[in-house]
Amino acid sequence: MTARQPLMLLAAVAGLLGMVALAFSIGRYPVAFPDLLRVLWSWMGGAPHGLDPTVETVLLQIRGPRVIAALLVGAALAAAGAAYQNLFRNPLVSPDILGVSAGAAVGAVLGIFLSLGIVAIQSMALAGGLAAVAMVYVVARAVRGHDPLLVLVLAGVVLGSLLGAFVALMKYLADPYNQLPAITFWLLGSLASVDPRDLWVAGPLMLAGLLPLWLLRWRINVLSLDDEEARALGVPTVRIRLAVIVGATLMTSAAVAISGVIGWIGLVIPHFARLITGPDFSRLLPVSVLLGAGFLVAVDTLARSIANIEVPLGVLTAFIGTPLFLWQLTTARRGWQ
Amino acid sequence: MATDNGEKGVAVSLAAEHLGFGYRDRRVGSDVTLQLEPGEVLCLLGPNGSGKTTLFKTLLGLLPPQEGLVLINGRDSSTMERDAVAREISYVPQAHGAFFPYTVREMVLMGRTAHLGLFTAPSARDHAAAAAAIERMGITGLADEIYTQISGGERQLALIARALAQDARMVVMDEPTANLDFGNQVRVLARIRALASDGIGVLLSTHDPDQVFLCADRVAMLHGGRLVACGETESVMTAAQLQKIYGIPVSVTGVSLQDGVSRKVCLPLGLLR
C-alpha cells in the first residue's frame, strides 16, 4: 500500500459524488445545484424547499431511482468483471463469459414474447441468467480430465451461442410492431423504465453477491495463480471458485434484469481499476465498484441528454468504452502481462 | 527427533507407503516408499518421463494416490483439508510467469494463505513473516519489483521465499535449478542447504547428478515409475546406478579441491575427446 493510494481512493469517491450531482442536475428539466441540495435537505426531514413541486418530482421520482439504478448496475457489473478476470486469470474476460447475459436475454425476450408484465419480465431475466450459469457449471463439472477453467469457458461460450439462437428465433417470430421494438430495446440496455420497487429487489441481491467476493478477497488473489499452486498454498479451489461464480452471477443477473444487456463495463472498468491499484483484489474490488458506478452514471446521463431520443446504453458504453480500452491497451504497462 | 506434533508420538515427516500414482487413465508409477524428515535434503533423480513431477503432485495431495498412502506426520493426507496440508508441506513449482503483475512482496505474502482465516486478509504479522522470508532469501531489494518482470533466477528465489513464508517443516521443490544460469543454480543450492540446517526437510528433483553431490544427504532414483535406489548419497550415486537409469556410460570420480577437501563429480564418457 503506497502513500498515494488512499488519496486516489478519496479522489475516486469525490469524483463519484460529483458525477451523481451532475446526473441529478442535467436533463430535459435542468435543476441548479443549490436547488438540488434544498430538495435533498427537505427530503431528509429538513426545512421545506419552497420550490416548484415539479422540481421535487423530477429529482426524487424520475432521476433519483434512475441514478441509483445506474450506480448499482455499474458497480455490480464492474465488481463481477473484476472477480471473473481474476478467476479465469485473463484480463479479457467479462461478466457474461459463463452465459449469464445470454440466459437473462432468453428469459426477458420470452417474457416480452408472451406479453407479460414488467415485473414478470425482470423475474424471468433474473431466473434465466442464474439458470444459464448453473447449467454451464454442471456441464463443466461433468467433463473430467481437462483444465477445469478451460472447460468452464468453453461450456459458457457454447451454451451462450445456443441461447443466442433462441433469442434470434423469438425475434424472428415476434410481432414486428409491438414486441420486436421492445425486445431490441431491452437487448441494447436501458435504465429508462427503472421503477423504485425494482431497486428494492435488485439492490439486496447485488449486495448478497458482493459479500462473498469481499469476504474471499484474499483467496481470490491466490485463485489467480495456477490451479495446483493455489491448492498447494492451502486453497480449496473448487469450493472457492464456486462461491465466486455464485456471487458474480447473482450480481450480474440482478443488474441485467433491471437494465438489459450493457456490455463493456465489466470488461473495461476492472482494467482501469487495476491500473490504479495493481492486481491485489482487496484493493481492486472497491475501486472497480467506485469506477463502475461512476462510469455508468455518467454514460446514463449522456444517454438521456445528448439527443432528443434515449440513446441505448449498450450502444453508448461501446462507443465510449472502445476508444478508452484501445487507448489503455496501447499506453498501459502495469495492467497485465 | 522432536515429536512436537503430539500425534501418538509420530515424528514430523512426509512419507509415501507403497504409493501408486498417475492420472485418471494412466498409471505413471507404483510401489514407491520413501520418507522425508526435517533437516535433511532428499534429492530425487530420474530421467525425463520417469514420473518425478507426478510423484511430487501426489505427495502434495494435488493428485489422489492410485494405491498406497501419503502420510504427513503419520496421518493419511487424503483425510486432511488443503490448508492443513499446506501448513505442513510447501511447494516450490518451477519458476513460471504469473497471470497478473503482482509484486514480489504480494507473491510471497500468498504463502501465508494457509494460516489465514477464510475471510481474512494478511495481517501485520503476516506481512512481517513475508518480509522475513524475503530477507532470508537475500532478495529484499526485489520486494517491490513486479514478479512478472524479474529474471527466472529471481523468480525462483521469490517462490522459495513464498514457501518459507508458508512456514511448513517440509518443502517440495520441482527442479528448482531448471532454467537458471550456473551462478544462480549454485546460489539456489546454497539456500537449500541453509534451509536444511534450519531444520526444514527439503525434497527436490534435479536432472544434474553433480547437484546431488553438492547438496543432498540422501538420494532417491526413479526409473520407469519405480524407485530403483534410495539411500545415502555416497552409496547410491555409483557409476553403475547412473548408467542404469540414464542409459549412457558415466564415470563418477573424486576431485580434490583446495585444503584437502575432495568432492565427487559425474562425467559422461561418450563425449570424451
Image (tube, coloured by chain):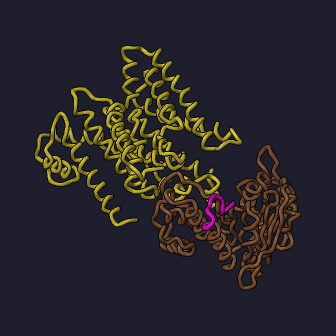
Q: Nearer the viewer, residue B135 or A117?
A: B135
Magenta segment boundaries in residue numbering: B174-184
Percent position (x, y) of residue B142?
A: 48, 67
Residue in the image at 80% along x and 74% along y: B254
For chain B, give the colour.
brown
Q: Residue at x 77, y 45 (%)?
A: B24
Residue A126 vertical position relative to residue A45 in the rendered view, above or below: above
Position of A267 compared to A7: left or right? right
Give the chain ID for the yellow colour: A
**Residue A215 in view, yes or no:** no
Q: Quadrant of residue A71?
A: top left
Label the magenta part by its dominant secondary structure.
Answer: loop
Compared across the picture, whether A90 is left or right of A137 comes to: left
Quarter that holds the N terminus of chain A: bottom left
In the displayed orientation, state which residue is furthest to the front. Answer: B273
Is residue B249 covered in magenta? no
Q: Is any part of residue A221 visible from this angle? A: yes
Seen in the picture, residue A91 relative to B41 is either above or below; the reply is above
Q: Is residue B178 magenta?
A: yes
Q: Is residue B23 above or below residue B3?
A: above
